[in-house]
Amino acid sequence: MPDNQWDEILAAAAGEVLETMFFAGVYGPAEPGASLTGRHLAARLGFEGTPSGALTLSISEPAVRALAANFLAADDDAAPPVSQLGSVVCELANMVCGSLLSRVKTEEHFRLSSPELLPEGAACPPVPPNQSLDVGDGNIDLWLALD
Amino acid sequence: MAFRVLIVDDSPVMRAFIRRIILLSGMEETEFLEASDGCEALNVLRAQWVDVVLTDINMPLMDGAEFVRRLEADDVLKSLPVVIVSTDSTESRMQQMLALGARGYVKKPFLPETLRQELERVLGGAYAR
């Protein structure tokens, strides 16, 4: 599959997950790497199959807080605790990866690893992200690396 | 009608999300039990009866496939309806899980309505009462 086609289905997968599970929309493309300019959280998971690879997702902290509040139905007085934000980012990465792979026509199972929250300050891939999305309260960058 | 639902997922935030969606779907009197993998779920089910199990596939210690296999091998628990709720949504995986004994399959991401319909289908007449 050409790289630009992967990028398209990655954007479609992220949009579907944000809309159906986080009740949020994608407002359009963001500056590549925009999520990395302030406080952010990042998660990574690998997948095995044809193809194998890894997905890395970075999201700016205001966006995580907004998405977590939607996902967990928290109101302003009971914002999700910081400890839950990382779990929400991992679940977001997991679902984007699952939605992406479900769009790949194959007879084979994919095996997804458990998403891992990257330590604060850990480097995201040293290449431009495949997708950068403006989600209103912040930005999301996505890197897809295929073996 | 009050139901007792066991949610099996290693992500606490996903368990919380599923609880919320079920309550919003009109099953306000539902009682929830939770487990973070198949092993823990089997221990719960040996102690308490539930009406339906919602389980992820990709979990540590005992994954969803092995969990469904163990339920099918148990004379008492094999009648328990199991619905898979997973990001792993390739056709071959769905067919594998249904062949193992799962009664339904909900792909993540899902609309709240999709989960409600699947529960309604699996619980049948009991849901409508």
Image (cartoon, grey):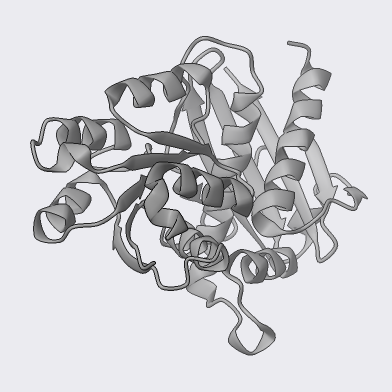
Q: In which quarter of the image is residue A14?
A: top right
Residue A80 lies, in percent from the top left, at 56, 76
Count of labels shown?
A: 0
Camera sees residue A127: no
Image point (78%, 18%), residue name: A3
In the shown orientation, is residue A54 left or right of residue A29?
left
Q: In this view, does A105 lie above or below B12?
A: above
Question: Can residue A58 be seen from the camera position used here?
Answer: yes
Would residue B59 appear left or right of B66 to someone viewing this image?
right
Q: Quadrant of residue A10?
A: top right
Residue A34 or residue A132, whichever sits in front:
A132
Residue B103 is situated, as x and y percent measured from the top left of the image, at 37, 34
In percent of width and height, residue A84 lies at 50, 68
Q: Image height check: is A104 above or below B50?
A: above
Look at 60% across and 45% down and name the residue there. B110
Comparing A91 with B29, the one in front is: B29
Tell me what residue is drawn at x 61 percent, y 77 percent.
Answer: A74
Work out which residue is located at the far bottom of the displayed protein and give it: A77
Which quarter of the rendered picture does the N terminus of chain A lie within? top right
Residue at screen point 76% across, 55% down: A35
Left or right of residue A128, residue A92 in this image: left
List x then y, in percent, for residue B62: 23, 39
Rendered-image quadrant of the C terminus of chain A: top right
Name above or below for residue B5 compared with residue A5.
Answer: below
